[in-house]
Image (cartoon, helix red, strand yellow):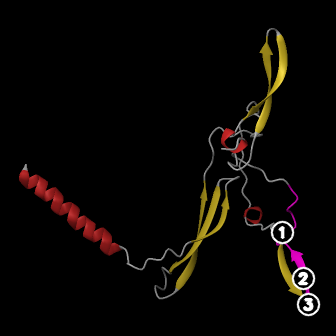
Amino acid sequence: MKSSLLLCVALAVSLGFVLVAGYPEDSGDDEHVLVNNKCQCVTVTSKFVPSKENPGEEVLERNIRILVPLRARENISDPMSPLRTTFVYRMTELCKKCDPVEIELGGEIYKAQQSTSCNEPETCYTYNRDKCYTTTFPFSYHGEVKKVQAVLTPASCYAD
């Protein structure tokens, strides 16, 4: 029993050294988030990595992470709408920058934005936790049916 315990400890310590030795001390995570779209559940990151063909050269690697929400509805604000079966992701829409930026041209300051399609509504596949979603539903009380508004995301609809 003692020898197996000692063997486990020695194995754990040696694995710890291997794991620690496998990562450089100055491993400054050079991964940059390009897109973090919570509405469509997409994250796009990029970082420079050594080239497989030429290890002395670095190439840009992009990682696209898509979470497909199960039981997502066509209209996320309507719990009775049909389940969504099609998810469309366009990099041009995900990467658009709609926040206006001030630039100086010829001594005058102008506001500009990088995208021309910022007025179009964005298709959301899940709830944006910062936005309040509600729906109305029929409520029967003493034989009388009334339309009642219900909150779908209580945490974002009510202040602490």
Question: Would you say 48 lies left or right of 111 here?
Answer: left
Q: Nearer the viewer, residue 114 or 51?
A: 114
Identify the secondary structure beneath mark 2: strand
Q: Vertically, is 55 above or below 22? A: below
Q: Residue furthest front?
A: 160
What separation in Å lies between label 2 and label 3 (alpha carbons)? 7 Å
Question: Would you say 61 lies left or right of 144 here?
Answer: left
Rendered location of residue 154, percent (x, y): 68, 38
Q: Give, as a three-letter code, the residue at label 1.
A: Ser
Callout 2–callout 3 Cβ contact below 8 Å:
no
Callout 3 crowding tier (Cα within 10 Å): few <14, some 14–19, many ≥20: few
Q: Residue at x 70, y 50 (%)?
A: 130
Identify the secondary structure beneath mark 3: loop
Callout 1–callout 3 Cβ contact below 8 Å:
no
What separation in Å lies between label 1 and label 3 (alpha carbons)? 24 Å
User: Looking at the image, is mark 2 or mark 1 earlier in the sequence?
Assistant: 2
Q: Residue at x 26, y 70 (%)?
A: 17
Which residue in the structure is indicated by mark 2? 109
The stretch of residues the image draws in magenta is 108-120
Q: Nearer the viewer, residue 2 or 139?
A: 139
The image quarter containing residue 33 is bottom right
The image quarter containing residue 82 is top right
